Image (spheres, rainbow, N blue to C red):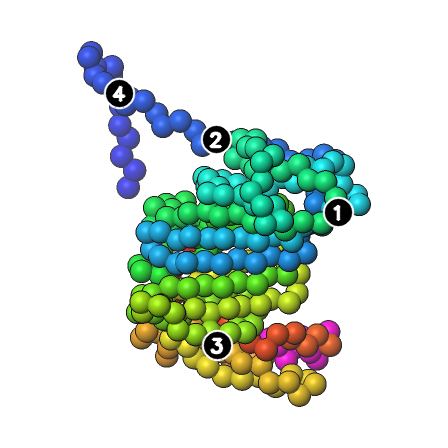
Amino acid sequence: MDIASRPSEPVENEKIADAAPPPQAQPVINREDYRPPNWLVPEVRLSFRLGIDATHLTSKLSVERNPEGGSDTLRLNGDGIAALCVNVDGKAADGWRMDGPDLLIDLSGDSHEVEIETALNPAANSQLMGLYASNGMLCTQCEAEGFRRMTFFPDRPDVLSIYRVRMEGDKESFPILLSNGNCVAQGEGDAGSHWAEWHDPWPKPSYLFALVAGQLVANHSTFTTMNGREVDLNIWVRPGDESRTGHAMDSLKNAMKWDEETFGREYDLDLYNIVAVSDFNMGA
């Protein structure tokens, strides 16, 4: 039932709260304005010392001059972060500068190693972009431009890199350490910590990077590819949710088999991990 009401009459001395300002409009990006990056990043090495309130990240970028680029300047996108130090080829870089949120370095030659350290507070990351904390777990959201909230990087989809990732954290708080690709090494650290190293051998844009650390359990199975390789399959969930993953595991196997039968596409890693928790702000 609709109830009509009379327009309210003005009231003297009534204080009306100001309307909240509209959200800032995103800049318009036109295809005709596209310019190739000046530098490419064939390989990235990331080293995380994980903590809910304090995470230290060291990134080492192997950069190569792009023949299609237009200048010597390496532009590394950033958002809400500060560089603790910047090194080029093992020495402190003197020529770097900030351009708004981005870090710029003028480089000569054709290849260099750029090392940058940043300090992050995942618990204070209310944007839930980049590395953030939720219910004691650390998660990342890098699509579309969240990677730049962790470290300075050419955060654009036409820069494809091979990722090597090392994570170290308290074993009780973060018993499971996951990232892209295959887990190639793991071990015990000092003072109750442990570590894991991951290698993703296929070049990918930064928005596909993922990291999850926390209390997780897995529904484990295997899939034998059309060429006889055995792939480990894991669906990681919060403890107690294991019984809810059976259909997802069956669907994953059916999808992998369908890719092979329909397109001749064989899965190209030794491990397939899915993390399905309510702490993600999008996707699994």
In the picture of the structure, the residue carrying the numbered disc 1 is 110
Task: Give the alpha-carbon distance from disc 3 to disc 4, as whole Å.
Answer: 55 Å
Image coordinates of residue 234 in percent, x first then y, are: 48, 76
Query: Type of residue at label 3?
Result: Asn
Q: Amino acid at mark 2?
A: Gln
Residue under pointer 3: 234
Asked if the residues shown at circle 1 and circle 4 are in contact, with their CB atoms under 8 angstroms apart, the answer is: no
User: Upstream in the sequence, badge 2 or badge 3?
Assistant: 2
Q: Is residue 262 magenta?
A: yes
Q: Main secondary structure of the magenta part?
A: helix
Instruction: Check if mark 2's residue and mark 3's residue have beta carbons within 8 Å.
Output: no
The residue lying at 74 percent from left, 36 percent from top is 71
Instruction: Determine the CA span between mark 2 and mark 1.
Output: 39 Å
Q: Residue at x 58, y 40 (%)?
A: 93
Give the camera-side residue of 94 and 61.
94
User: x, y percentage for residue 267?
Assistant: 64, 75
Q: Which residues are magenta?
A: 255-263
Regarding residue 4, the answer to whether it shows in the image is yes
Q: Amino acid at mark 4?
A: Ile
**Image vertical order of residue 58 relative to residue 6, above or below:** below
Q: Which residue is mark 4?
A: 16
- Of the residues under marks 1 and 4, which one precedes in the sequence? 4
Determine which of the numbered discs, if any, sits on residue 24 in the image.
2
**CB contact under 8 Å: marks 3 and 4:** no
> SS at mark 4?
loop
- For marks 3 and 4, the one nearer the N-term is 4
Q: Are marks 1 and 3 in contact (CB under 8 Å)?
A: no
